[in-house]
Image: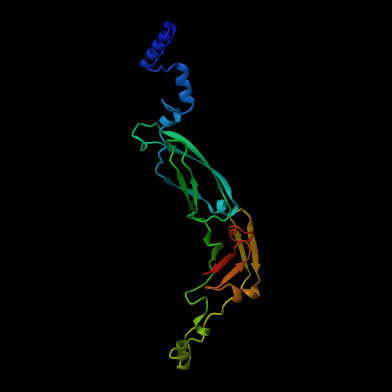
Amino acid sequence: MTPQQQQQLLLQQQQQQQPPTFGLDDWLRSMMSGGGGGTQQQHRRPRRPLKEVTRTLSCTLADLYEGKTKTVTLTIGNNNNGLGRQQKRRQEQYTIHVKPGWKAGTKIKFPQRGRYVPPITFVVEEAPHATLERRDADLIYRHKVVGSSSDGDVDDTTSGNPRDQKRRGRRKKNPTKEPPQRQSPPKPVRLSIALPDGTVWQRTIPADRVPRIVKAGQSLTVPDLGMPMKGTLERGNLVIEFY
C-alpha cells in the first residue's frame, strides 16, 4: 500500500468517527416537510364549544302578520366564559328576519362566534294584541251584543221553555200585573275592526239580518283576513264571535 493510499484510508476512518452535522438549511427543510420542530398548527389549541344561550324575541302581532327585520344587541361575557380565564364583556349584534306567519315558540339559531361568543337561540314570544286573539292561522275578534243575556239574547217569555208554558197555563193571581214590554225593532249593526297591518275592515249588518246573525254564541267568518300560513300564499280567517 502506497503512502497516498494509507492517507486516504486514515481520512475515511476519521470521517466515520465524527457525528453527523445538522445545519440551518437542514433544519429549514425539516420544518417545511413537517419533520422535527413541528408546525404552528400542531401547537394551536382546538376551539372549545361553548354552552348554548337562549333568549326571547318579543314580536307584536303586526310583526308576525307582515314580517319585520329586527336587530338585537346582546352583552356577552362572564368571569371565565368556561375557558378558565378572565374575559371582557362585549356587545354582539344579531339581525333576525321575522317571516310572516311565524308562531310563538319559533326558534332562530346562531352558531358560535370565535372562541368567546357562544351559540345563541332566540325563541319567538308573541305580545298580546289589544283587540285580536290569534288561534293558529285565524284572528278572533269578540263583539258584545247590546242587551244580550245568559240565555243567548232570547226572551224567556217566548222561548218555549216548559216552565214558561206551565206559568201560562195557570190562572193569573195578580190581575194588575203589568203586561210585558214590547221589544224595540232591531237596528243595523256596524262592525269596524282594525287589522294588525293598520287597515280597517268595516261592514254593516242590515236590520233584517241582525236577529239571525248577531246573537250571543254565534260567529261570523271573513275569509283570507287572518294570519299568513307558512310556506303558502294562503291566509287564515277573521272570525267575529258575538257574546
Q: How many marks?
A: 0
Locate residue 231 relative to residue 171 in the image: left or right: right
Describe the colour scheme in one phrase.
rainbow
Residue 4 lies, in percent from the top left, at: 44, 6
- Indicate the quadrant where residue 70 lies: top right
- Indicate the quadrant where residue 1 lies: top left
Residue 53 lies, in percent from the top left, at: 42, 45
Q: Nearer the viewer, residue 39 or 155?
A: 39
Toward the top, the furthest residue is 3
The structure residue drawn at horizontal position 51% and vertical position 87%, both measured from the top left corner, is 160
- Indicate the quadrant where residue 48 lies: top left
Viewer can see residue 175: no
Viewer can see residue 212: yes
Image position of 199 with respect to 181: above or below: above
Q: Nearer the viewer, residue 71 or 60?
A: 71
Image position of 190 with respect to 128: above or below: below
Q: Nearer the viewer, residue 92 or 236?
A: 92
Residue 144 lies, in percent from the top left, at: 53, 67
The structure residue drawn at horizontal position 38% and vertical position 16%, both measured from the top left corner, is 16
Locate residue 79 relative to residue 206 in the image: left or right: left
